[in-house]
Image (cartoon, helix red, strand yellow):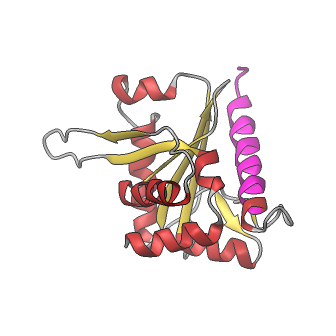
C-alpha cells in the first residue's frame, strides 16, 4: 500500500460498517443511523459519551450507541495468526484492550469489528455476550457460527485479555431486538 493510503482504507471501512449496521438496525430502510465519527480515533477526554469510530445519526443509532462502542480495523496482514505471534497496540489484543477501556469509561459494551484483506469481516466481544448469542442460535435452530475464544495468560502486572471472535454476519443474523435482549440478560 502506498504511504498515506492506510488512513483512507480505514475510513472507508468505517463508513461501510456504519452503513451495514444502520441497515441492520432499520431492517434495510436506512443506511444513515450510524456514521463515521468526524474525529474517529481522536476524541478527547471531554467528549461526553462519544467513543469509538461510529457516531449516532438517528434514533436507532442513538439506541445502539447507548449500548455499544464500535472500533473498526482493516488491515493487510494475517490478524488471527497475530493473536499468537504479536503483542503491543497494533494487533487484535492491543486494539481490544484500548477499546475495552474506552467502552468502560462510557459504560458500554465493546465491539471490535475487523477485517484483513481477502477475508470475512469478524467481530470480537465479551465472552458473556458471545455465549448468549450462541445460545440464541441453538434455541432458534440456526447453525452455530464458527468462533474463536482468546484468553491471554497475564504476565506480571498485566491484565488477562479475554474476548470471543465470530463472523460479523453471525451477529447480524440476529435481530437488533434479540441482541439488545441478549445484552440485558448478560449483565
In which quadrant is the C terminus drawn? bottom left
Q: Is residue 187 magenta?
A: no
Q: Nearer the viewer, residue 149 or 11?
A: 149
Q: Nearer the viewer, residue 7 or 135?
A: 135
Residue 103, how many percent across, how many down? Answer: 46, 64
Q: What number of labels is visible? A: 0
Q: In this rendering, does residue 99 appear at all?
A: yes
In the displayed structure, 6 sits above or below 51; it is above
Q: Does the magenta stretch include residue 5?
A: yes
Region in magenta: 1-22
Farthest residue to the left: give it: 156
Q: Nearer the viewer, residue 55 or 16?
A: 16
Residue 162, how many percent across, how many down? Answer: 32, 48
Residue at 42% over, 26% down: 82
Left-right relation of 146 to 55? left
Among the 4 quarters of the image, the one containing residue 130: bottom left
Report the predominant secondary structure element of the magenta stretch: helix
In the displayed structure, 9 sits above or below 131; it is above
Residue at 77% over, 75% down: 58
Q: Which of 90 and 3 is in front in this view?
A: 90
Amino acid at each position: 500500500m502506498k504511504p498515506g493510503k492506510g488512513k483512507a482504507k480505514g475510513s472507508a471501512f468505517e463508513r461501510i460498517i456504519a452503513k451495514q449496521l444502520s441497515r441492520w438496525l432499520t431492517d434495510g430502510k436506512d443506511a444513515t443511523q450510524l456514521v463515521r465519527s468526524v474525529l474517529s480515533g481522536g476524541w478527547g477526554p471531554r467528549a461526553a459519551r462519544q467513543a469509538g469510530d461510529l457516531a449516532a445519526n438517528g434514533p436507532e443509532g442513538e439506541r445502539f450507541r447507548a449500548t455499544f462502542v464500535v472500533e473498526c480495523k482493516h488491515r493487510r496482514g494475517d490478524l488471527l495468526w497475530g493473536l499468537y505471534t504479536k503483542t503491543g497496540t497494533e494487533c487484535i489484543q492491543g486494539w481490544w484492550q484500548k477499546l475495552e477501556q474506552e467502552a468502560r469509561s462510557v459504560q458500554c459494551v465493546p465491539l471490535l469489528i475487523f477485517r484483513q484483506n481477502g477475508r470475512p469481516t469478524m467481530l470480537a466481544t465479551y465472552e458473556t455476550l458471545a455465549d448468549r448469542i450462541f445460545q440464541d442460535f441453538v434455541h432458534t435452530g440456526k447453525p452455530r457460527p464458527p468462533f474463536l475464544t482468546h484468553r491471554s495468560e497475564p504476565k506480571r502486572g498485566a491484565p488477562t485479555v479475554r474476548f470471543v471472535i465470530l463472523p460479523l454476519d453471525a451477529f447480524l443474523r440476529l435481530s437488533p431486538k434479540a441482541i439488545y435482549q441478549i445484552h440485558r440478560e448478560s449483565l
